[in-house]
Image (cartoon, rainbow, N blue to C red):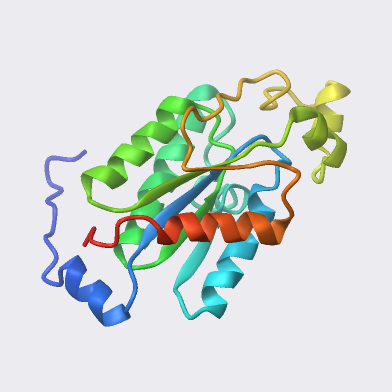
Amino acid sequence: MSANVIWQEATLDRARRWEALGQQGATVWFTGLPGAGKTTIATAAEARLIDAGRSAYRLDGDNLRHGLCSDLGFSKGDREINVGRVGEMALLFADAGTVALVALVSPYTDCRQKVRELHERDGLPFLEVFVNTPAGECARRDPKGLYARARDGSLSGMTGVDAPYEEPRTPEVELTPEMDVDAAVALVLATLDERPRDSA
């Protein structure tokens, strides 16, 4: 950080902002293997919240790599930076009173924990959702053709194939393939609404 950068304190505090908006912000962090269903469930949750008149926005890992994180590769270090950047962005959305729905593989436990601690430090709700779809099912779905490319050797560093994925130890929500999208979204949003409402 440059010595010439000074934090600018807000004159509008969070409690006033959230009261005016009539809702509180939060981050819902969907993690799981590629092809697990993170984006599908996050997209449906976003629509459900918007239809209910609540501000929500999906931050998708692939989409962010087209812009904010386009300079990053898939080394361990770059993945850590990627999660950190997205975590900081989600924090800002949540502080603004929006429900940030992050769909990101985020394979490392320590990186996800740092994002959680960032939110806890600022008194913002953080919900970790483990989309626990087994690797075999993800490979069968293979919506982006990544597993096929990893198998034929044209893609290396594939999470769940030749790069690690560290499963969450104590996620607030765990979703399995037996649940349909509607049931998964209902469980996520019910858990979100059970979180403490006095974080402002």
Q: Position of residue 112 (x, y in %)?
A: 43, 35
**What residue appears at the point 67 percent right and 58 percent down from the top-left corner?**
183
Residue beneath the point at 63% across and 48% down: 62
* Quadrant of residue 163 within the rendered picture: top right
Closer-to-camera residue (18/176): 176
Rendering coords of residue 86 (x, y %): 44, 47
- Side (left or right) of 126 relative to 141: left
Which quadrant of the figure contains the C terminus?
bottom left
Up-down relation of residue 156 to residue 2 (above or below):
above
The residue that appears at 72% across and 49% down in the rendered structure is 179
Side of 85 relative to 120 (left or right):
right
Task: Identify the image quadrant of residue 9.
Answer: bottom left
What count of labels does the image hold? 0
Return the x and y of residue 117 as percentages of the image width and height: 30, 38
Residue 59, percent from left and from top: 52, 56
Identify whether 200 is placed above or below 71: below
Which residue is painted at 15% across and 72% down in the image? Answer: 12
Q: Is residue 183 above or below residue 145?
A: below
Decide if residue 139 is on the left or right side of residue 43: right
Quadrant that contains the N terminus? top left
